[in-house]
Amino acid sequence: MSRRLANRIARPLAGLLLAGTAAVPVWAGETVLYDAAPSWVDVAKVEPKPANSNAIIMLLDQQARIETGKLSTYFDTAVALDSPEALTRFGTLTASWMPDKGDLIVHRVELIRGGEVIDVLKGGAQFEVLRRERGLENRLVDGELTATLAVQGAKLGDVLRLAYSTTLSDQAMGDNVQWQGGLIAKPFPLEQGRVTVSWPEALPVTRLRLGKAEVAEPVAKGGYMVWSANLPVPEGDEMPEDAPSRFRIGELMQVSTYADWPAVSRNHAQHYGTAGKVTPGGDLAGRIAGIAAASDDPLTRAAMALRLVQDDISYLMNGMSGGNYIPQAPEETWEKRFGDCKAKTLLLLTMLRELGIEAEPVLVRSQGGDVLPSLSPMPGNFDHVIVRAVIGGTNYWLDGTTSGVRADTMDEVPRFFHGLPLRDAGAELMALDTRAQSTPDRVVRLTVDQRAGLRVPATFDVTIEYRGTIGAGWRSMASQGSEEMREDAVASAITEVIGDGQVVEHSVRYDAEAGLAVLTGRGIMSSAWTRDGTDYKFEPPAQAARDVGFEADRARSAWRAIPLQLNGPVYFTSTAEVLLPDDVAGVKLEGSAAPVSATIGGVELASTAKLDGRKLTIDQTMRTVKEELAADAIGAARRELNRFDRQLPVLRSQGEVRELWQYFGKDRARLSALEALYAKGIAKAEPDDPYPLINRAGFRMGIFDFAGALADVEAAMKIEDSRDLIYARATLRRELGDMSGALADLVEAEALQPDGSTYGEQIELLALLGRAEEGLALAEDFEALTKERADGVTVMASALGWQGAADEGLDLLDGMIAQRPTDGNLLNALCWQAAIWSKMDEMRLDSCTKAVEKSDNAPTALDSRAMAHFRLGNLAAAKADIDAALLAEPYQVESRLLRGIILREMGDNSGKDEIALALKMRPSLAATYKAFGLTF
C-alpha cells in the first residue's frame, strides 16, 4: 500500500476521508459524465450570506451511500467570490476520480447572483480532463484523473456552486466498503455544511465515532440507515503537540463493512501469496540462489535480500489497474526494477520464503500508529506495508522502501506501534516490539584543541558516522551532490553535534557494504568557557548523554493525564577529547569521576569521564527504549534527569588562566595554528562568501588586533555590505583614532535602521570633535523616537553633560528618579554623570550606592561608584569598588583604566602598567577620559 493512498483519501476541502470497494474490476470511462444528482441525495439549499458572516465557504455538503461493493459520494460546495483573491483562487473548479474504479458525474455548475441562478453548463461549458500524473515528481503514479473548468463570466459578489458525484468500486476489497469523514471545526470559515453516510439497513457494518462534538445516532429512512453531522462542529479542545497521535486525531466518523481486523487481514492476504511467483531458472531465481550460496545464516540471508530490494529496486508507486491495494508481481517488480511499498514487500516476502525464512506481510500506519486500536477495522487506516521476518525467535520488521539497512542494524524497530499481519486465516492487530537497538544510529568522535588558551577560540576535528536508514540519506550527497551542497550539509550536521562553528575542511563518503556514512570536519569554534564567579566553567560539546529532555507542558488540568510522546527510536554514542593548555594553573573535573548510568523516562544513559593531565576524555551513550512517558512520570523523570546531569563532566579552572589581553607581542605566536586555520578558511571561501572574513574579524577584535580586524571588515564589505559591518567598522575606526570616520559610519548605520541606537556614541564623538551642540539635537530627536521616557532623559543628560550643562542634565535625572526611585539604571546614570563631570557630593554618592544595590548590571554600577569615590578623594573606597567590578567582569576595560588611575594616585607604580594595558585594549578611552578631566 502506498503513502499516497492516505493523501488521496484525506483530500481537502474538508479533510474528509473516503475510500471504497468492488467485487470485480469495473472499468469506468475516462470521460466526465453529466447528469442529475442521484435520487438518494438530499440536495441542500444555499442560503444568503448573513451580513455579519466572514465565511468564505457558503456550503460544504458531502453525502455518501454505501452499497455492496460500491461507494457513491456526492459533493456540493458553494463559495462566496467576495474578493479579487477569491475570484482567482476559486474561479477554476477541479474534481478528481479514479477511472479504473468508478465515474465522475457532474450535476451542476452555477453562479448565484442575487436572486438569479446562472447555469454555467447550459452554455456548453465542459470540464477538461488533465492527463498529467500530479505526483510523478514524487514517483507516484496513482491513476487518478483530475477534471478542471475555468468558469467564465464570474463576477465579484457571485456565489460559485459545484455539485458532482464519484463512484468507487475497489478491485482489491471484494464486497467490502470503507468510509471515513473528518468533521470540520470552527473557526474554519464555513457557513453551513454537512457530512452524511448511509447504508442498507440489512447490511452489517462496524461504526466508529471519535471526538467530543455532538453527532446524533443513525436513523432509519427508506430502508437505509442514515448517519449525519452538521458542520462546522464546535472548536475542539487544544492538545499539546507532544501528545501521542491518538490524543490528536480530532473529530472522526468511520463506517466499514469489515466485521473485524481478521476480516481485513483475510481480505488482503490473498494479494500477497508467494507460491509459484518465482520463475525457475530466471534472473530473480538466480539472485535468490546466489544469496543462499553466499551464507547459511538466516540473518545474513535476510539482510542480503533486504539490501537487494532496498538498493536495486527504485521506489515508484503504481496505483493504476487496482494497484492502490494490489501489489505487482515479484517478477514484474524485478524486471522493471521499480515498485511501491506493496511491490517491494511482496518481492522481499517471496525471496525470504524461498530462502527458508519465516515471513509475512504487515499493514502499518507510518504516522500515528498508536491510534490504530481505537479505529474501526478498514484498510484505509493504513498507508504502508512491511515484512515481519522471524529469525531465531526474534521479530525483524523489514521495510523495503527504506535503504541502508544491514545485518547489524536490522534489529531496529520502526515507530509504527501496531501492525496488521495479512494471513489467510486472518489476524488481529499486533503490537510491534519495543526493544533497544544494538547498533548506534550516530557515532561522534570529537577532539577540541584548546591548547592556545581557554579564552580564545578552539580548533576542532570531528568524525560523525551515521548507520542504517539515517546513513543512507547521505548516499546521494556523497556521490552526486555539488561541493557547495556537501559543505552546507556537513556543516549543518556538525552544528547539530557541537553547536556553532566555522567548518574549514570537510569530507563525506558512503560505504555501501557497511551501510555507513562518514562525515569529517575540521574548523574553529568559539570558546565555550564561561565566567562563573571568579573561575571559568566549560561544558564539553557533543555529549550524547545530554541530548535528552522531558520538557512537556501539562499544567492544564485537562492535559494532566496525557503522556509525552518520546522521539525515537534513537541510539547515539559520543567520544570527546579536550586538549588543555600547558600553562593553565589548574583544571578540575566536576561531576562523577566514576562511570555513571541510568534508565530515565524510557531512555538509557551512560557516561565515563577521565581527566589525565591536560587531556579530558568522555565516552557517552544515549538509547531510547520506550515510545512514550506516562504523564504522572514526567515530573519524576525531569528530577532524575537533573540529578543525572549533575554527574556529567564539567571542567572548572583553578587559579589564573591566560586572558585575551595576554596575546600581545611575542605571545601572539601562540595563536599561529588558529590563525592559519582562519586564513585557510578565507582562501577556500567562495568569492561571494564574506563570513570567513567576518569570523576572523571577530576573532581579531577579541584579541584587540583592531587594524587586522578593520582590514577583514572592509574586505567583507566589498563582498556584501550590511549595517552590522558598517557599525563594526565604526567601532574599529574609533579605536584606531579615526573619530570622523567612525562618526560617518554611525550616521550611515543609523540611516539604514533609524532607531536611535547609535545616538549615544554619536553624541560622544560629536563632543570630542568639538560639535557638542549637534549632539544635543540628536538627544532631542531621540526623545521623539523612544517610547521609554527614562531612556530619553538619560540620553539628554549625557548630551547636556558633553555640552557643559551637566547640572541641567542632573536635574532631569533627579526628576525622573523622583518618579522611579527604585530604577537601578536611572540611579546609575545619575551617579555616572555626576562623577565624570565632577558634580559629586555625599547626597549623590548615596544614589550611587542605591544603584549598586538595585542595578541589573552590578559591575557597571560599581565602576560608577568607584569614579564617584575617586572624585571625592576616597581612594581606598574607589579601589575596593573597582576591584570588585573587575572581579565580576574582567573585560570591563573602563574599570581597568580607572583602576590604573586610582593606583597611580595612591602612589602605586603598577598603575602605569594597568593604564597601558587598558589603552591597548581600548585606545579610544584616552580621549574620552581626558575629556572628563582625568590625567594619566
Image (cartoon, rainbow, N blue to C red):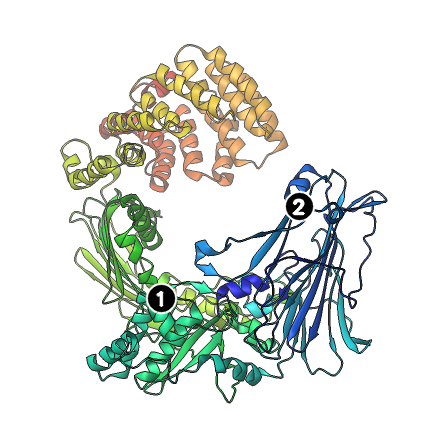
Residue 596 appears at what percent x and percent y? Answer: 31, 71
**Extreme residue toward the right, this view:** 115
Residue sitting at x 54%, y 68%: 244
Q: Quadrant of residue 659?
A: top left
Q: Secondary structure at mark 1?
A: helix
Residue 233 appears at what percent x and percent y? Answer: 73, 61
- Residue type marked 2: Phe
Q: Secondary structure at mark 2?
A: helix
Q: Earlier in the sequence, mark 2 or mark 1?
A: 2
Residue 90, numbered circle: 2
- Residue type marked 1: Lys
Residue 153, numbered circle: none
Residue sitting at x 50%, y 55%: 133
* Left or right of 701, for residue 789: right
Q: Residues within 10 Å of mark 2 (few under 14, many from 20)?
A: some
Of residues 312 and 586, the one drawn nearer to the viewer in this rendering: 312
In the displayed structure, 827 sits above or below 266; it is above
Residue under numbered circle 1: 336
Can you say which quadrant of the picture contains the C terminus? top left
Q: CA distance from mark 2 to mark 1?
A: 41 Å
In the displayed structure, 135 sits above or below 729; it is below
Residue sitting at x 82%, y 56%: 45
Q: Residues within 10 Å of mark 1 (few under 14, many from 20)?
A: few
Residue sitting at x 55%, y 85%: 262
Of residues 875 and 374, the one drawn nearer to the viewer in this rendering: 374
